[in-house]
Structures are given as structure tokens and as C-alpha cells.
Image (cartoon, helix red, strand yellow):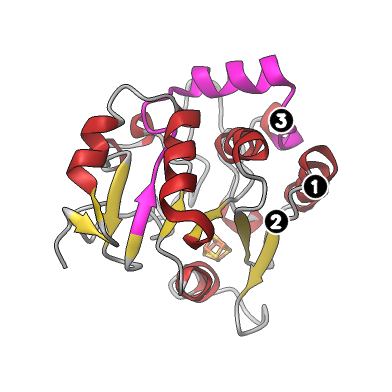
Amino acid sequence: MSTEIAVGVNLDEANRRLAEASPAEILRWAAETYGDKLTMATAFGPEGCVILHMLAEIDPSIRVFNLDTGYQFAETLELRDRIAARYGIEVEMVRAARSVAEFDPDRCCDDRKLGPLRRAVTGYDAWISSIRADQSAHRARADAIGWDAKFGLVKVNPLLKWTKRDVWAFVVTHDVPYNPLHDRGYPSIGCWPCTRAVASGEDERAGRWAGQAKTECGLHSLDSSQL
Ligand code: SF4
């Protein structure tokens, strides 16, 4: 499939048109373009919470889901309830077909994140992610609107050009609910077996899969023209 025309939309043209657009403008474009064929995945990071704040104003009916691996922190799960209370957005919990029987870091993300994500986006034309270009070299290669060949739909990255500082400024200004673990040395939060607090000066993702070669769960890694 051409990466330029996807689900009837010329992605190069869309990116040109949205080159100077704000995250809210990108989200509004996505909501108007894809309607009920647009969905969003969130792990309740500050970026995701910022997007949920914006979606509450743009279109709170957009279906949002969380990949509930069974290993999320209690603080993360509680944040789901705080988001629902604040915005009226009930984030759907998408679970793996198999129960948490044993921890196998080689298969675990495949079973608990990639497989469930693949099922969760089936039938949708586009999904919203909250990656930022400054998080890693390969995320820096993403476009605001791109073809996600791994999952077979368009990927919308409204916060691509924002920095961590931009995100937190928005959180503070708008009193957006966030995970309290961020105040306890966890800048990036995944599953508890694979996340540790980071020391001052360490990279913000240094606490994810620390001690392993792995740096991404595979949801946003490149095996295509788009992240
Ligand atoms: S982050 Fe760790 S616990 Fe979570 S799905 Fe991946 S390997 Fe499993």
C-alpha cells in the first residue's frame, strides 16, 4: 500500500497542511477526517493525559483504550478513574487473551501489548499516539500523520513537536491529572517489573527495561516508513 494515500487521505498533503498546526488542531483534523474510525491508545503518561484533555473539548466520544498488561502500577490504574471523573472519558481496558501466568520478557510485550493492540485497532482507520520526537532518534523520524505499516492504519502523532517542558507546562496550566509516580523519580512509566526510578541527570526513558538491550516495547519501533 502506498504510504502517501492511506484510507483516502493524501498523507504528504496532510502533513504539509498541518506543518504549523498545534496539537489541538491536529487532533481536530483527525477527528473530522476519520470520525468514528479514529481511536487512541494511552498508557496514561503525561502526554496521553494532555491529549485526553484536548479530546474532551474536541470530541470526547472518540474511543480510547489502554493496554492493560496486568503489570501496571496501582497509581496508573487509579489515574484511569481520575480521568473518567474529570473528563467523562471512560478509557477501555484491553487485555491479553492469556492470563498473567509467568513473566517472560522476551514474549511478554508481544503477548500483552502488540497482540492486544493489533486486535484493538482492527476496523479502525487511524490511531492517536502520544510520542514526542525528542524522546528518541527513531521517534524523531516520525511525521505528524503517517502510515503505520506494522498495524495497518494511519498513526496520528499530535505532540510530535512538543518537548517534555511543553507537556508539563500544559499539565500545570490546565491542572491535568497525572500519575503521582512522576513526582517520585519515574519520568516514564510502564509495567512495574520493567520500570525503575531514574537518578537526576539520567535520560527520561533510562528506567524502562533497565539492564536489558530493549528500549521499546515494539508499539512505536520502526519496521516501516512510520513509527
Ligand atoms: S513492559 Fe515488561 S511486563 Fe510489560 S508487557 Fe512488556 S515485558 Fe511484560
Residue under pointer 2 = 91
Decide if ligand 1 comes within 8 Å of the CB at mark 2.
no
> Measured along the vertical axis of the image, is residue 102 above or below residue 157?
below
Label 3 Cα neighbours within 10 Å, binned few <14 / some 14-19 / many ≥20: few
Residue under pointer 1 = 84
Label 2 Cα neighbours within 10 Å, binned few <14 / some 14-19 / many ≥20: many
* In contact (CB < 8 Å): disc 3 and disc 2: no
Is residue 131 left or right of 54 when viewed as pictured? left
Label 1 Cα neighbours within 10 Å, binned few <14 / some 14-19 / many ≥20: few
Q: Which residues are magenta?
A: 154-181
Q: Position of residue 143 (x, y in %)?
A: 27, 40
Q: Residue drawn 50% across and 55% down?
A: 35
State the image quarter where residue 142 is shown. Answer: top left
Cα distance in 3D space between marks 3 and 2: 25 Å
Q: Residue drawn 43% across and 72% down?
A: 106
Residue 203 visible (yes or no): no
Q: Position of residue 219 (x, y in %)?
A: 41, 59
* In contact (CB < 8 Å): disc 2 and disc 1: yes
Cα distance in 3D space between marks 1 and 3: 24 Å
> Measured along the vertical axis of the image, is residue 79 above or below residue 70?
above
Q: Position of residue 206 (x, y in %)?
A: 46, 38
Residue 22 visible (yes or no): yes
Element under disc 2: loop
Element under disc 1: helix
Amino acid identity at mark 2 = Val
Amino acid identity at mark 1 = Ala
Classify the position of ligand 1 by quadrant: top left, top right, bottom left or bottom right.
Answer: bottom right
Decide if ligand 1 comes within 8 Å of the CB at mark 3.
no
- Name the mark on residue 184: 3
